Amino acid sequence: MSRETLLPQLAAYALQHGFSDASLRPMAKAAGTSDRMLLYHFGSKQQLMDELLSHLADIYAAALDGAFPQGRTTSLRACIDQVMAATRSEPFKPFLRLWWQSVAGGVSGEPDWAQSSGRIMGTMLAWLEEHLPEGLDDPSGTAHHMLAVIEGASMLDAVGRGEIADLAIEKAFPE
Amino acid sequence: MSRETLLPQLAAYALQHGFSDASLRPMAKAAGTSDRMLLYHFGSKQQLMDELLSHLADIYAAALDGAFPQGRTTSLRACIDQVMAATRSEPFKPFLRLWWQSVAGGVSGEPDWAQSSGRIMGTMLAWLEEHLPEGLDDPSGTAHHMLAVIEGASMLDAVGRGEIADLAIEKAFPE
DNA sequence: GAGGGCTTGTAGCGAGTGCTACATATCGCT
DNA sequence: AGCGATATGTAGCACTCGCTACAAGCCCTC
């Protein structure tokens, strides 16, 4: 059992239980080892969380790439609809819990969390720009706009105001 | 010392330290009492947090009302610029930490937190619609769109990607 | 087979958590 | 004055937290 073997199991546990229940003993149990060994392999909980966060960011990026539509979309509305459908789908819920916990952690003085979240936003921005319909005046600006709307809508979903999110998308990118 | 006397001091403590450090003994010390008495007055920590959250939501709504521009704005761009300037100002940072912690808490299975956050979004939406410039085709839809952009931008700020937020606003509501 | 590093188990420490039992103080009311 | 309700202090419980001291097992090399 090494870091590399442990990380996927720790990631699975985090996705299922969130970061708030991520203390050493439960994580160790889920990974089939002991708190003693987690500290032996990672040095400290802080380092374990750093590596876990980075590992989860990789998984998340891969999941986005797999779940989002392939190739360029045919309209702005089609693009955002497909992205929203993906992020609202059941398999994404565990990621979203971790996502908002990361955002909260970042703004609460954990610079690594903010940096990790910020990197993911960069990835999404690049992805959007590549998958926007062709022939736009300002693809970069449009991708920025769409990212803000997507994330605002996703937050509104998270707090139970999905209707606001739907209307916002409708207005931002009409048919 | 009653609930009403305690709540403002507890709110001040939460704004300064965030929810993650909100355990009974530190909060009691900050409020000049003991954990024993907090439980005596509120019954349980759960009930204390419920009342504190509701109290903080009131304070937040009042702070928004005070910080945001009065009366109708002259253009969409002026409106969103003033709102962003207010939420990005130093006195708002403590609120934003609690805000993102509430969002994360809501999506992590604390229904009260989601409900409280959702209510604040309703307040902001109504506020926006009232302060938009006059004579718009679709003031409600515009307010929805603007709310999503504001919140997406605010999250991007939170994870250290303010430049993405700025460009998104520029594109969404050009001069 | 003996030594020596890598890995693992057991047990515990000190601090913090929400919460409670018990005793006391304080105050208004009759 | 005495009683009962409200308020408060002291001490502790059972638990979890990250982390560590100590010892034992393991496997490779000489």
Image (cartoon, coloured by chain):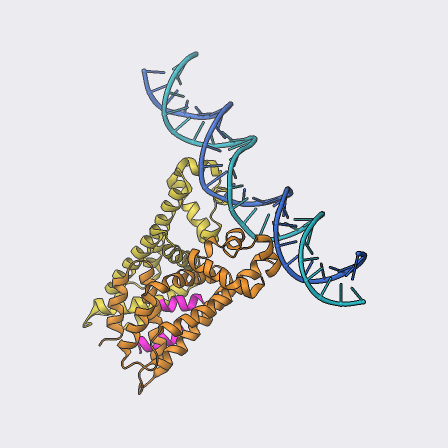
Chain colours: A orange, B yellow, C blue, D cyan
Q: What are the residue bounds of the magenta stretch?
A: B152-175
* Image position of D30 with respect to A74: above or below: above
**Image quadrant assignment for residue A142:** bottom left
Residue B47 belongs to the span the image colors magenta: no
Question: Which quarter of the image is occupied by the N terminus of chain B?
Answer: top left
Q: Is residue B51 visible to us here?
A: yes
Residue D24 pos. (x, y %): 69, 49
Residue A57 pos. (x, y %): 47, 68
SS assignment for the magenta stretch, majority:
helix
Is A126 on the left or on the right of A77, as rendered?
right
Instruction: Name the residue rendered at 58%, 63% in the picture.
Output: A2
* Image position of B118 with respect to A58: above or below: above
Residue B46 pos. (x, y %): 39, 44
Is A42 on the left or on the right of A58, as rendered?
right
Question: Which quarter of the image is occupied by the C terminus of chain B?
Answer: bottom left
Instruction: Name the residue rendered at 44%, 57% in the picture.
Output: A18
Is D27 on the left or on the right of D12, as rendered?
right
B114 or B7, which is in the foreground?
B114
The extreme bottom residue here reads A135
Residue B157 belongs to the span the image colors magenta: yes
Instruction: Name the residue rendered at 55%, 66% in the picture.
Output: A4
Q: Give the number of marks.
A: 0
Q: Is residue B143 visible to us here?
A: no
Residue D23 pos. (x, y %): 71, 47
